[in-house]
Image (cartoon, rainbow, N blue to C red):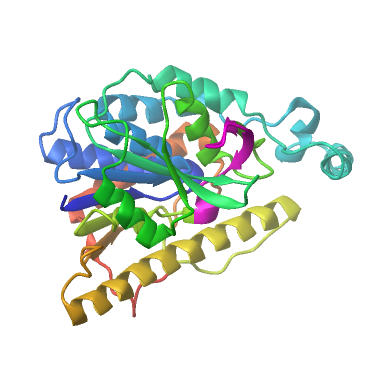
């Protein structure tokens, strides 16, 4: 394998990624049902995992259609009892009451502000598990029961259900021998993808069977791997990373919810920078020695990201005009292509 595509997390800003994907397919005259050349693997986290599924199944028209109507699905919807917290036009007294109600609830039994049903329904409407896989796909989730990262994969039908031994070994070298990497069958596909998008506090954790047969609690994959460069580099010589955040600037926060989102985004940015920098320096060491260790290939990293910030909020799924604008910006960005990663100058 020579190239892998990595799609980071980023909420509604995933529309930018989708625009890039559709533009790359159009530019390469790649039809629905065909692999997105030159990629032999696609990796995703959070919203990037959902976009990755469309790449994996070669459904570029469906990807455009899904994002073109996503606002009507209201996939980020508060639970009815907390509606005022997420409604800026609500009376201050109502918002204060519901903040207090939620603060009390989360100390006892409540796990999130939002509903999971709308995003699951959107996935079920647009992501058919029976769609043939044309490009292997891997995505990250965070197993809170074991407090560790976990990776799910789907392979084309021509391959066996198990990762080849050489790739399994490379994954052990990169991720550690105890890291769980397992297939996601049709029976758990939607829930495994939902787990990767389950932002803490926004969505309830997702319950999935673990490898030992017991149930585990899973949340957003971007907590452990916001850009799965480490997975991609185990099998690819070239890794192209699509990010949804521009270089950071000054941020101001008006309330506790904004602070929580800001903290989360800061963590995601640091995870991405660390993953890319670590992979880059591993490659330098390998090239200085023999060009490759024998276990892992020497890797060239490129990236694409917006030049200026996208939507102000990662939960702006209900604003179709904003979604459409980000999608269009992705299409435009794809015309310039990927930039080589240079550690001295790159930062989010």
Residue 15 versus residue 272: which sits nearer the camera? Answer: 272
Residue sitting at x 63%, y 37% = 216
In the rendered structure, the answer to whether residue 255 lies left or right of residue 169 reads right
Residue sitting at x 44%, y 51% = 310
Question: The C terminus is located in which quarter?
Answer: bottom left
Q: Among all residues in the image, which is located at the extreme left?
A: 29
Q: Quadrant of residue 58?
A: top left
Where does residue 147 sit, x and y in percent of width and height?
62, 52
Q: Is residue 38 above or below residue 237?
A: above
Residue 217, magenta (yes or no): yes
In the rendered structure, the answer to whether residue 165 lies left or right of residue 120 reads left
Q: Is residue 50 above or below residue 310?
A: above
Where does residue 118 sit, x and y in percent of width and height?
58, 24
Q: Quadrant of residue 304?
A: bottom left
- The total number of labels drawn is 0
Q: Is residue 107 visible?
A: yes
Where does residue 345 sit, x and y in percent of width and height?
34, 77
Residue 231, magenta (yes or no): no
In the rendered structure, the answer to whether residue 61 lies left or right of residue 276 reads left
Where does residue 347 sit, x and y in percent of width and height?
41, 71
Residue sitting at x 51%, y 68% = 249
Q: What residue span does the magenta drawing correspond to? A: 208-224
């Amino acid at each position: 394998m020579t190239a892998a595509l990595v799609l980071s997390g980023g909420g509604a800003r995933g529309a930018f990624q989708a625009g890039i994907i559709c533009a790359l397919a159009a530019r390469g005259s790649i039809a629905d049902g065909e692999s997105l050349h030159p990629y032999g693997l696609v990796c995703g986290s959070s919203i990037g995992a959902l976009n990755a599924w469309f790449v994996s199944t070669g459904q570029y028209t469906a990807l455009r259609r899904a994002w073109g109507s996503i606002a009507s699905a209201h996939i980020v919807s508060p639970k009815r009892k907390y509606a005022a917290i997420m409604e800026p036009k609500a009376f201050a007294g109502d918002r204060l009451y519901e903040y207090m109600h939620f603060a009390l609830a989360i100390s006892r039994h409540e796990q999130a502000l939002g509903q999971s049903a709308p995003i699951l329904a959107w996935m079920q409407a647009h992501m058919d598990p029976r769609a043939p896989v044309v490009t292997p796909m891997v995505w990250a989730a965070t197993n809170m029961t074991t407090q560790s990262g976990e990776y799910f994969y789907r392979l084309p039908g021509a391959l066996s259900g198990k990762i080849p031994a050489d790739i399994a070994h490379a994954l052990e070298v990169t991720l550690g021998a105890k890291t769980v990497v397992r297939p996601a069958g049709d029976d758990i596909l939607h829930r495994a993808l939902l787990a990767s998008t389950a932002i803490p506090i926004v969505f309830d954790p997702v319950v999935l069977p673990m490898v030992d047969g017991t149930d585990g609690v899973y949340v957003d994959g971007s907590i452990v791997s916001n850009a799965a460069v480490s997975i991609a580099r185990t099998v690819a010589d070239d890794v192209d990373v699509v990010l949804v955040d521009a270089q950071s600037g000054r941020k101001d926060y008006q309330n506790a919810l904004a602070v929580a989102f800001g903290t989360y985004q800061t963590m995601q940015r640091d995870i991405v920078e660390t993953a890319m920098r670590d992979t880059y320096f591993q490659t330098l060491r390998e090239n200085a020695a023999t060009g490759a260790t024998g276990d892992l290939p020497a890797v060239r990293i490129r990236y694409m990201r917006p030049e200026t910030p996208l939507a102000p909020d990662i939960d702006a799924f209900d604003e179709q005009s904003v979604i459409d604008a980000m999608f269009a910006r992705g299409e435009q960005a794809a015309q310039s292509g990927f930039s080589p990663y240079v550690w001295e100058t790159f930062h989010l």
